[in-house]
Each structure stands twice: as structure tokens, then as C-alpha cells.
Image (spheres, rainbow, N blue to C red):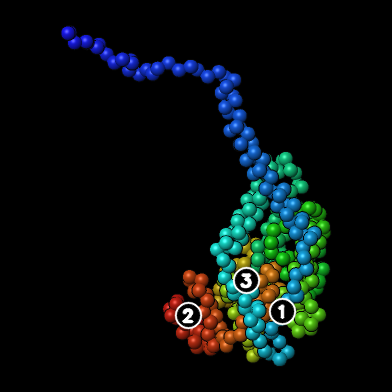
Amino acid sequence: MPKMKFSGPLIPTGTSPSRKKSSPKKRVLNLLPVAASTLVLVIGFFSLPTILAIDLAIQDSVRPPQPKFTVTVDPANKTIIENPQVEAILDVKPTSLTAAATQAGNIFTQVAVAISNFPAYRQVAGANTLFVTIKPGFRKEQVANLVGGTLHWTPAEKAEFLKYATARDEELPEGQFVPGTYFLSVTDPDQVEVLLHHRFEEDILARYSSSTEEQVPVADAITVASLIEREAGGWDDMRLISGIIWNRMFVGMNLQIDATLQYAKANQTTGKQGTWWPPVVPKDKYIKSPYNTYQNKGLPPGPISNPSVAAVVAALNPKKTDCLFYFHDSKGEFHCSKTYEEHVKMLKKFYGQGK
């Protein structure tokens, strides 16, 4: 039987079996689920600022009363009494679940605030969904620049805002803006100042009992807290730095806080150096200012920044320590010493020189 010969492949090269082409109508129907899902994602994405605004409004309207501040420092008798309850509250390490939830909340807030600043979003939402996040340790001028930039204030409106903030309490010309995220439901400088101060009343003043006021006046607590906020490298340092600050006052030692030099230095230049917290050099210790704690004993005339609630708790509940000197090394680790000699020795160990 003769062999069969094939002149080529059964299916020509570069071709495939014919398929029935789908109709345009069917292709459109296939794309509908994708388009719908994309639309839902876009709507959800741009709804985040509104959700955050509602959440903040609910928090402000139904916020339960906060417990009164504890106080374990007694300036009159120059004593600090450890309170295990405070230790447990501030020193407890969060579980991984709590940490994850907190991180998720922070990311949600950051994303929502970022979206609210998109030009496209602003054109649609207008000025009805605007936010600002005040960071711990900001000066009032930084707050004015932050809010003013968001609301497009003129220099005159920023000055008006600062005038209201300074005039509210002569003992607290600084320090009345609690760090956090705010929904700006108003735009006028005087109304914004009232809005921000409302949280100070709830988070600080409402938690300050008359007995605490007698022991540590709120102006002193906010002032100490403002120093702690600028000096601490993190939560773990706050109570220890507070203890050192109180120890220095107990023995009549000048506080020698570098952050007060930064504050005094920026006051002289009105932030023209490009920062409200300029670097400190040795000659700054001789700046003529009531805020210079190298030259003046006791607390400065008022706060130097806007401290967090955690810093206020630390100011009222310092950690008992024998240390009088401290510094952070290049890795951010905290070191403290009882004497100046030990302090210099420690500095030489880490930096090769004392100061």
C-alpha cells in the first residue's frame, strides 16, 4: 500500500481554527462588571474624607468624659511618688492586634486627609471637607501656617488667628492646640481658634481637677509638657525627662533645655531662617530672652510648643530618678547621669567630647 504524502501541516502555520467573533454588545456586557467595580472603588476612595469628617464629628459630639488626671509630683514638698497605675498606663506595650488596629487607623486618617487635598476633590467638595493634622510640638505659628495654608488665609487672617490664640489666656500664650486631626467645619480665623480650643477644653481642662490645680497649676503643667514634647525621643523617654526637669527645679538648678534656646532664637528671627526650630550652637546659650533656661532659673514664662496629652500626663507624673543630666545618642537611645562629671564621661564615650 503506497505511503500517504503530506505537503504541509494539517493546519497552516500562523493560523488557528476559526472562532466565532463576539458581538460588540456582548463585549460591552462583559466589561460592565469591571466598570462597575472600578466605579465603586473610585467612589469609595473619594468618600474617605467624608467618612473621616463624620467620624470626627461623632467623636466631638458624643465623646465620653475622660478620667481626671493623676498627679504624683509635689513641687511644694519637692517629692515624686511613683504610682503603679500611671506606670501601667504609659509603659504597657500594645499587642500586635492593637498595634495593627492603631496603624490602620493612622493610615486611614492620612489617606483621607491626603485625598481631601487633591485639587480634583477640592473642586467637587469645595471647602466643606477640609482637615488639618497638628503634630505634637508645633508652635502656634506653625499651626497658623498649617491651617492658613489649608484654608488659603491671607497674612492678615493668620495674624488675626494668632491674636485670638494669644489673647485667650495670658498665662498660656502657647500650648492650647491639642495635637491631632481636625475637621475644619468653619473657615474664619476666630471660629477656627474656637474650634481648636474646644478640644483643649475637653482633653485637658475638663480632666484637670481643682486639687490638681492647687498642686500643679495647669499653666505650669502645660509648660513642662511643652519642654518634654520637644526634648523626648519618644513615649518611653517622656516620664524620665519629666523627672529630670522636676529634679533640676527641686535643687534650684537652671533647666538648661536646648528647645527653649530654639524657641527664643526663632522669636528673634520670626522664623525667617526657614524653620521655627533652628539648630542650636554654643553661643545661643547667651541669647537674651526670658525663655533662655540656661540664663534664667525656673520655668520659662510659658509653654514653648503645643504638647500632646501624653506629655501632659508625663509632666504631672514624672518618673522618680536620681538623674540630673541626659542626652540622646546618634541612634536615639536615651542616657542620663546623676552628676555632670558622669555626663561628660558618657558624652566622650559616644561622641569623643563633652559639652
Q: Around disc 1, counting alpha carbons within 10 Å, would you say few (fewer than 14), some (14 to 19), or many (20 or more)?
A: some
Q: Is residue 321 left or right of residue 62?
A: left
At 55% across and 63% down in the image, what residue appears? 96
Foreground residue among 302 and 111: 111
Residue drawn where x is 78% and y is 68% of the image? 65
Residue at x 67% of width, y 48% of height? 48
Q: Amino acid at mark 2?
A: Leu
Residue assigned mark 3: 230
Q: Position of residue 193 (x, y in %)?
A: 79, 61
- Total labels: the figure holds 3
Point out residue 160 in the picture as x, y percentages from the top left corner: 80, 59
Which of the 4 image quarters holds residue 59?
A: bottom right
**Closer to the observer: label 1 or label 2?**
1
Residue flagged by tag 3: what amino acid is it? Arg
Cα gap from disc 3 to disc 1, whole angstroms: 22 Å
- 222 or 72, nearer to the observer: 72
Of residues 204 and 288, the one drawn nearer to the viewer in this rendering: 204
User: Which label belongs to residue 347?
Assistant: 2
Residue shown at the point (63%, 53%) measured from the top left: 108
Mark 2 → mark 3, Cα distance in angstroms? 21 Å
Q: Amino acid at mark 1?
A: Thr
Depth check, front residue: 236 or 89: 89
What label does residue 70 carry, if any? 1
Mark 1: which secondary structure? loop
Q: Check disc 2: other Cα within 10 Å, few if <14, some if 14-19, many if 20+.
A: some
Q: Disc 3 vs disc 1: which is toward the camera? A: 1
Q: Position of residue 184 (x, y in %)?
A: 76, 54
Figure quadrant of residue 123? top right
